[in-house]
Image (spheres, rainbow, N blue to C red):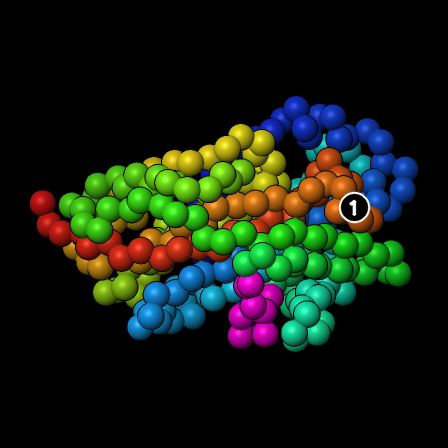
Amino acid sequence: MLVLLSFLACDRLENAGETVDGFGDTTVAQGLLLGADFPDGLTLPPESNMYSAACKVFLAEVTDTEDITDAPVSGADVAYIDAGEGTLSFEEEDDGEYLLYSMDGLAYDPGDEAVIRFDVAGETGELRVEMPDAPEVEVPSSITAGDNVRVHVTEGRFANLVVAVYDVDHEKLTWDNLPDDVGSTYELNASEDVIDELVIPGDAFKREAMYVVGVGGLVTADPDTLDGVNRSLSTFAAAQMSLHIVDAAKE
């Protein structure tokens, strides 16, 4: 469901590495919360991966910078604290990867604070971030199939962009940059620059079809709000995606 730009942020990794005395220093948590602002009348099947809300959390242990992707933490109790729904429990999808979706009761409410708490063998941690509104963006409404598409943010300042492209006619997600492990999530969330533009490759629009393009502006947590984790390597980020119809025609 997303756009991910990869920024390696190697200097931050190098600076985080060697001090690992306590639980908070050794535990890495990377969270990504996404909402989708669906236009009236637009519904997509679950396989599109464009839910009205979705959250992914990766947990790992680190003793030096080489371990961030090699030591997933399994069996943790991970919960989302929702003011209306109460406590919502994540399901562990893979070693160290925890997921929660709108069908589980998760809601994305711009302006509210998202809170995640986790427990690993009695040791606890917490992540917090304020949920931003969807960005104002320019996306072309019609293109030639196979063309690159430039997405430009016209209002708002964001640390990164998340984007997904869904072929409505063939019911297929054709491109996104959603991270698939703790390392790639770190790379996405670690960007310290303001991002206002992204180019979607033409391979996302190979066929003549109608596409939905989702664009979200990423806001990351203040490190001081993270508790029980290595703050140099941990982040919680949120974005609401605006959805745009793009018609791809034959050349």
- In the rendered view, does 49 fall on the left or right side of 103? left
- In which image quadrant can residue 48 be found? bottom left
Q: Whole-percent x and y of residue 136? A: 39, 47
Q: Whole-percent x and y of residue 41? A: 31, 73
- In the rendered view, does 92 fall on the left or right side of 178? right
Residue labelled with disc 1: 229
- In the rendered view, does 157 fall on the left or right side of 31? left
Q: Whole-percent x and y of residue 40? A: 33, 70
In this rendering, the answer to whether 150 lies above or below 88 is above
Q: Is residue 75 visible?
A: no
Which residue corresponds to the image point at 43% horizontal and 70% vertical from the top-left?
46
In this rendering, the answer to whether 42 lies above or below 65 is below
In this rendering, the answer to whether 87 lies above or below 240 is below
141 and 94: which one is in front? 141
Question: In the picture, which quadrant includes the C terminus?
Answer: top left
Residue 248 is covered by the magenta coloring: no
Crowd rating for badge 1 (residues with CA inside 10 Å; few <14, some 14–19, many 20+) = many
The outermost residue toward the left is 251
Question: In the picture, which quadrant includes the N terminus?
Answer: bottom left
Q: Is residue 5 visible?
A: yes
Numbered range of the magenta stretch: 100-109
Q: Amino acid at mark 1?
A: Val
Residue 101 is covered by the magenta coloring: yes
Which residue corresponds to the image point at 71% horizontal and 72% vertical from the top-left?
87
- In which image quadrant can residue 169 be found? bottom left
- In the rendered view, does 216 fall on the left or right side of 66? left
Which residue corresponds to the image point at 60% horizontal and 66% vertical from the top-left?
100
Which residue corresponds to the image point at 73% horizontal and 35% vertical from the top-left?
232
